[in-house]
């Protein structure tokens, strides 16, 4: 015969409201709950890491932007400096270009100086509103007016006519001031013919 | 659904049987919890801790009035059970008898709890609790009877001491069923087992004669022995003349008793003694079933 060893007979006073265990399939409920918590933790970790990386990247971009802005400002400053230099150079160029018509006059004045005469100060000014008139201030180291006459004569040969000349002689220096106006010889001739 | 139900689902305890659900095995009820097993005699209390892995610990016992022992040593025993859950083996004040012609309807053994009168008929007594094991080949049955008041007193005694009783059983009956299951393993009557079962459990002795699959005689006494084993042999000696020559002896004890097989060999000369005893056998059976 066969006698199987079954459950032990229990004589304990039974409680009435003993509930049977829940079906094994329902273990999925807490398992899914814990899985969802694990997934949430993992996703939160990934998010936190990504957030940190994004913050670092943003800070890096900010630093890069600031660096580029500083470089741009440097370039602007350099450009401003260059423009300033260009303006100075242009001014000098313009000055040289504008002074070119006066160079024969200057050369003639310098060449007119005799052995005992010297130019202490020479000044030629042109006004922007009236560029055809040249205000000349000449201070010479000489003890006679002959040198001045010679110089004025040389100036006249260059078709400049002196208006309102003033001269002052004293202490071995002659100070001469006049307004020179260039007269075109062709126009003079045309005027004479028409008269 | 309240917070307790929710907690029980989240910690998976809702998927395990409740601690006092007697339909579930001890192992399933307490899968990772320390519990304690008590053996209750008339003037003796023994206890053994069960660790979280279900391994029985060392057996300790004191001979005195169990209620007094429990009152004095409960603080020492309580740490062995985390939540206070314990199983109690009642080794006294029970009756194991051999009955015939009891109801064999399907589920009759389980029906004993709900409707014992329907199973036992005229043998039913009010205020008793029963357990039953049928012989599948004959009309005989082994009937275990407990006094209900005594069981309740035992439960309240342990409850007052701060324990929660998860199981009350009879150690000798558990061991007897184990021995029957170990020796009667093949279906049919072609290979019948002839043996004289001797069960010893903390002072209680039960003897059953099985001849050609028939249960012929059963004798059960409680509080028979303490240290000296002579009362056991004195109780069993009269069986010698009534046993057939081919019947061997199957011995089952809750703890191996070294001297007993030799003594039995002297009382029953010429009979093979098969000792099924193992250390903490009763505790192991209580854990597994």
Image (tube, rainbow, N blue to C red):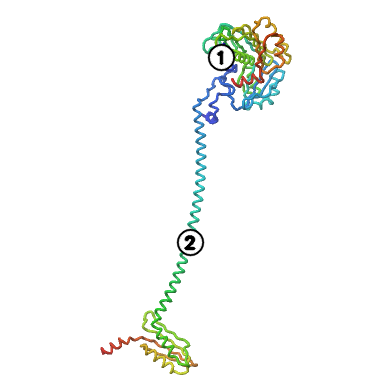
Query: Quick check: B150 above or below A33?
Result: above
Q: Quadrant of the C terminus of chain B?
A: top right
Q: Position of residue A34 (x, y in %)?
A: 52, 34
The residue positioned farthest toward the top in the image shown: B241
Quarter of image, res B264: top right
**B281 or A47, which lies in front?**
B281
Circle count: 2
Chain at numbered mark 1: B
Please give the residue where the numbered disc 2 appears in the rendered image: A71
Q: Can you give x and y, in whole percent of width and height, for residue A54 in the image?
A: 49, 49
Subunit ID for the residue under disc 2: A
Instruction: Say the numbered circle drawn on residue B113.
Output: 1
**Element carrying mark 1:** helix
The correct choice, above or below, for A184 with respect to B177 in the image is below
Give the distance between the C-alpha atoms of the residues marked 1 and 2, in whole angstroms. Answer: 95 Å
Q: Residues within 10 Å of mark 1 (few under 14, many from 20)?
A: some
Left or right: where does residue B84 sit relative to residue B8? right
Neighbour tally class for label 2: few under 14, some 14-19, many 20 plus, Cα within 10 Å = few
**Are the numbered discs 1 and 2 placed on the same chain, yes or no?**
no
Q: Is residue A82 left or right of residue B199?
A: left
Q: Please say if the residues under marks 1 and 2 sit with CB atoms less than 8 Å apart.
A: no
Residue B99: give x, y in percent of width and height: 59, 7
Residue at 59 percent across and 25 percent down: it is: B30
- Residue under the image location 51 percent in, 42 percent down: A44
User: Looking at the picture, how far across and down is residue A46, in whole percent?
Assistant: 50, 43
**In this view, the mark in front (1 or 2):** 2
- Residues A10 and B117: in front is A10
**Element assignment for label 2:** helix
In-image side of B208 versus A161 (left or right) = right
């Amino acid at each position: 015969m066969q006698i199987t060893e079954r459950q032990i007979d229990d004589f304990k006073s039974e409680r009435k409201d003993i509930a049977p265990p829940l079906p094994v399939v329902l273990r999925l409920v807490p398992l899914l709950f814990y899985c969802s918590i694990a997934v949430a933790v993992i996703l939160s970790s990934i998010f936190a890491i990504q957030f940190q990386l994004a913050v670092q990247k943003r800070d890096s971009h900010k630093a890069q932007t600031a660096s580029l802005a500083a470089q741009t400002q440097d370039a602007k400053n350099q450009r401003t400096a260059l423009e300033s230099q260009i303006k100075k150079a242009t001014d000098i160029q313009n000055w040289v270009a504008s002074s070119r018509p006066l160079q024969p006059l200057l050369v003639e004045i310098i060449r007119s100086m005799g052995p005992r005469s010297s130019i202490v100060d020479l000044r030629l000014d042109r006004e922007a509103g009236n560029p055809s008139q040249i205000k000349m201030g000449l201070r010479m180291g000489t003890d006679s007016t002959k040198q001045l006459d010679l110089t004025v004569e040389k100036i006249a040969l260059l078709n400049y006519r002196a208006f309102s000349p003033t001269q002052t002689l004293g202490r071995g220096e002659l100070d001469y001031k006049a307004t020179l106006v260039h007269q075109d010889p062709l126009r003079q001739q045309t005027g004479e013919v028409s008269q | 659904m309240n917070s307790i139900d929710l907690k029980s689902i989240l910690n998976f305890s809702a998927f395990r049987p409740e601690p006092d659900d007697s339909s579930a095995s001890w192992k399933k009820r307490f899968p990772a919890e320390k519990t304690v097993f008590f053996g209750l005699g008339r003037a003796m209390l023994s206890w053994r801790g069960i660790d979280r892995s279900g391994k029985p610990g060392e057996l300790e016992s004191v001979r005195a009035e169990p209620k007094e022992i429990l009152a004095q040593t409960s603080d020492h025993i309580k740490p062995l059970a985390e939540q206070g859950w314990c199983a109690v083996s009642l080794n006294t004040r029970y009756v194991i008898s051999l009955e015939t012609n009891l109801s064999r309807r399907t589920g009759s053994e389980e029906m004993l709890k709900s409707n014992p009168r329907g199973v036992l008929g005229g043998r039913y007594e009010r205020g008793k609790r029963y357990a039953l094991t049928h012989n599948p080949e004959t009309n005989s049955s082994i009937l275990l009877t407990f006094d209900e008041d005594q069981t309740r007193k035992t439960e309240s005694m342990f409850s007052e001491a701060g324990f929660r009783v998860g199981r009350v059983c009879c150690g000798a009956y558990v061991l007897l069923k184990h021995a029957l299951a170990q020796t009667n393993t093949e279906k049919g009557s072609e290979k019948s087992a002839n043996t004289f079962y001797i069960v010893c459990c903390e002072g209680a002795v039960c003897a059953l004669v099985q001849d050609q699959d028939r249960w012929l005689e059963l004798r059960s006494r409680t509080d028979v022995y303490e240290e000296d084993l002579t009362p056991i042999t004195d109780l069993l000696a009269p069986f010698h003349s009534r046993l057939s020559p081919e019947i061997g002896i199957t011995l089952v004890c809750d703890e191996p008793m070294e001297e007993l097989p030799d003594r039995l060999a002297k009382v029953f000369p010429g009979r093979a003694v098969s000792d099924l005893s193992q250390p903490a056998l009763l505790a192991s059976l209580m854990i597994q079933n």
